[in-house]
C-alpha cells in the first residue's frame, strides 16, 4: 500500500474553508484515496474517496493532483463540529476495508 | 439503511480475565467485517477481517481471536487479557468492489485492563 503523509495538526477559523493536505507520492494506478474523520471517542466516519478526478459530496470536496501524488480535502465552511482527526488512506478499492490508518491530522476549528 | 452496533461501550477487566466483544450489522447482507484497535492518541490497527461466516483472517499476532458465527455478527475474544490489550476497539463493515466500498464504523468499546 502507498504510504500517506499528513501534517500533525491544523487550525481553522469557523466559517472559513479548511484545506487538509495529504501526500501519497508512491500511489499506484489502481489505488484510491479515501478520507475519514474521527471525532473524539467515536468511531471514524467516512467522508469521501476518489481515484483521479475531483470529487464533491455533501460533506466535502476532494482535489487530487494530476500526477496523483497528493490530494487536499476541503471543508468549505468549517464549523466547530468539524473539529476532529482527519485520516487520509490510500488503498486498492477492492481491499478498501483492509486499511491502515496513520496518526492523521488533528483539525481544530476555532470561533 | 445500514446500522452497526457494538457493545459494551466501556469495559474494565482484570488481567487474566476473559473477553467477549460483540458487533452486529443490520440492513445489509454478506458484509465484510473488521476489528480494529486504537491506542490512545494514535491511528487504527487492523486486527481481524472476515469475508464470510467462519472465515477469519488475522493481520497481527496477538492475544486475541475473532469469530463470525452468523452473517452479520462478529465477535472479538480473549481467554486471558493482558495489560497491553487495553485500548479502543472498533468494529467496521464494508461491501466488496462493484459498490461504494468504504468502511463504516461502530462507536467502539473502550477496554481498560487493570
Image: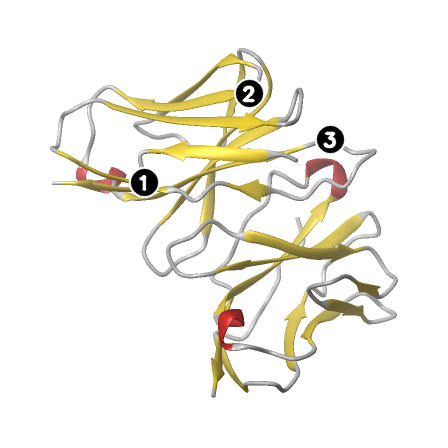
- Name the residue tied to disc 1: B9
* Residue at 40% over, 42% down: B108
Secondary element type, mark 3: loop
Residue A84 in sight: yes
Name the foreground residue: A7 vs A28.
Answer: A7
Q: Is residue A26 above or below residue A83?
A: above
Cα gap from disc 3 to disc 2, whole angstroms: 15 Å
Query: Callout 3 environment at 10 Å: few (<14), some (14 to 19), or many (20+)?
Result: some
Question: Residue A33's image quarter?
Answer: bottom right
Q: Percent x, y for residue A41?
A: 37, 55
B84 left or right, relative to A4: left
- Name the residue tied to disc 3: B96
Secondary element type, mark 2: loop
Q: Is residue B27 above or below residue A46?
A: above
Q: Percent x, y for residue A38?
A: 49, 58
B39 left or right, relative to B23: left
* Residue at 65% over, 69% down: A22
Residue A106 in sight: no
* Residue at 65% over, 74% down: A21
Q: Are marks 3 and 2 in contact (CB under 8 Å)?
A: no
Q: Are marks 1 and 3 in contact (CB under 8 Å)?
A: no
Query: Are the residues flagged by discs 1 and 3 from a single subunit?
Result: yes
Q: Chain of mark 2?
A: B
Q: Is residue B48 above or below residue B56?
A: below
Name the foreground residue: B48 vs B70.
Answer: B70
Tell me which colouring the rendered structure shows: secondary structure
- Name the residue tied to disc 2: B72
Amino acid at each position: 500500500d502507498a504510504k500517506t503523509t499528513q501534517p500533525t495538526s491544523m487550525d481553522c477559523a469557523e466559517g472559513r474553508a479548511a484545506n487538509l493536505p495529504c501526500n501519497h507520492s508512491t500511489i499506484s494506478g489502481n489505488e484510491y484515496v479515501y478520507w475519514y474523520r474521527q471525532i473524539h471517542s467515536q468511531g471514524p466516519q467516512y467522508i469521501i474517496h476518489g481515484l483521479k478526478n475531483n470529487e464533491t459530496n455533501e460533506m466535502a470536496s476532494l482535489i487530487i493532483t494530476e500526477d496523483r501524488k497528493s490530494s487536499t480535502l476541503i471543508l468549505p465552511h468549517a464549523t466547530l463540529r468539524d473539529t476532529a482527526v482527519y485520516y487520509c488512506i490510500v488503498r486498492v478499492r477492492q481491499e478498501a476495508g483492509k486499511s491502515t490508518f496513520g496518526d492523521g491530522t488533528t483539525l481544530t476549528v476555532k470561533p | 439503511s445500514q446500522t452497526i452496533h457494538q457493545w459494551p461501550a466501556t469495559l474494565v477487566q482484570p488481567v487474566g480475565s476473559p473477553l467477549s466483544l460483540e458487533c452486529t450489522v443490520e440492513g445489509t447482507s454478506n458484509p465484510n467485517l473488521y476489528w480494529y484497535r486504537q491506542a490512545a492518541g494514535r491511528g487504527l490497527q487492523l486486527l481481524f477481517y472476515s469475508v464470510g461466516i467462519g472465515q477469519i483472517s488475522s493481520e497481527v499476532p496477538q492475544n486475541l481471536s475473532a469469530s463470525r458465527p452468523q452473517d452479520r455478527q462478529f465477535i472479538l475474544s480473549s481467554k486471558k487479557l493482558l495489560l497491553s490489550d487495553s485500548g479502543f476497539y472498533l468494529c467496521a463493515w464494508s461491501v466488496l468492489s462493484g459498490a461504494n466500498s468504504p468502511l463504516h464504523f461502530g462507536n467502539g468499546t473502550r477496554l481498560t485492563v487493570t
